[in-house]
Image (cartoon, rainbow, N blue to C red):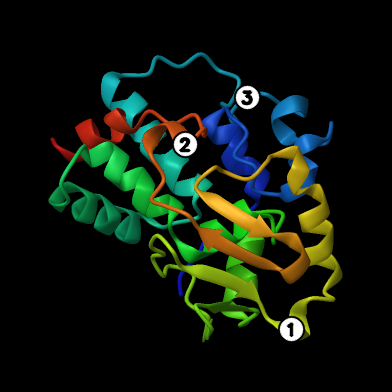
Amino acid sequence: MARYTGPSCRLCRRENTELFLKGDRCYTDKCAIKRRNYAPGQHGQGRTKVSAYGTQLREKQKVRRIYCILEKQFRGYFQSADRMKGVTGENLLSLLERRLDNVVYRLGFAASRSESRQLVRHGHFTLNGRKVDIPSIQLKAGDVLELREKSRKIVAINDALEAVVRRGIPQWLELDRSSFKGTLKGVPAREDIVTPIQEQLIVELYSK
């Protein structure tokens, strides 16, 4: 599976916002945005005039990078959202939030989405009692995600669960810490997604 393997902090600086791609580091003074709050590269500190298209493109790139998705797959999500009933932008965010790797991250089993993807790929979780290893699986209301018995002593997972208090767990999810189990209570509504995203800009970009 293709994925981005370059420096994560470079992406945050390019989008001029914290994407929280490196877990706990993003909450410290070592965060790249706090240390060098300008775009990477030789001309990163130069003045730039951004067009309407540039603004739309940057918003799309930001969302792609938040959820660790490449362009072809992201466009597929947009096309699926466009075919669904309701508001396309809100449908898109709902599809992205209900990805298995994102749910693992939101429940606090991992410090970042890239870490949650790795945990899923290595088969540490079961979904409704069945082992899963595909990060892009779409969860639906009532699905139960559980950490496998043999994986419950992994230090990184337990550390992430302890630190989840910092960012909190969304209302559409429920975590049973004692049994390492999470439940999708319902499909996330737009007001449940607190990540600063202007989804309408993405709709405008792809609608041209």
Q: Nearer the viewer, mark 1 or mark 3?
A: 1
Choose the circle earlier in sequence order: 2 or 3: 3
Judge by depth and name the residue closer to the eye, 169 or 163: 169
Residue at (45% x, 17% y) in the render: 48
Q: Upstream in the sequence, badge 1 or badge 3? A: 3
Residue 3: percent from the left, percent from the top? Answer: 50, 65
* 10 Å crowding of disc 3: few (<14), some (14-19), many (20+): many
- In the rendered view, would you say 85 is above or below 56? below
- Check disc 3 and report the residue beneath it: 38
Left or right of 153? Residue 44 is left
Hey, what amino acid is under mark 3? Tyr
> In this picture, is 106 found above or below 15?
below
The spot of residue 117 in percent (x, y) is 58, 67
Residue position marked by numbered label 2 in the rendering: 192
Helix, strand or loop at mark 1: helix
The image shows residue 33 at horizontal and vertical percentages of 69, 29
Which residue corresponds to the image point at 53% horizontal and 63% vertical from the top-left? 101
- Mark nearer the N terminus (1 vs 2): 1
Per the image, the residue denoted by label 1 is 149
Circle 2 SS class: helix
Q: Residues within 10 Å of mark 2 (few under 14, many from 20)?
A: few
- Front: mark 2 or 3: 2
In the picture shown, does residue 187 fall above or below 59?
below
Q: Residues within 10 Å of mark 1 (few under 14, many from 20)?
A: few
Quadrant for the C terminus in the image: top left
Residue 40 appears in the rendering? no
Residue 7, compared with residue 136, is above or below; it is above
Q: Position of residue 153 (x, y in %)?
A: 85, 76
User: Which amino acid, by three-letter code, is at mark 1?
Assistant: Glu
The quadrant where residue 37 appears? top right
Badge number at residue 28 = none
Q: CA distance from mark 1 to mark 3?
A: 45 Å
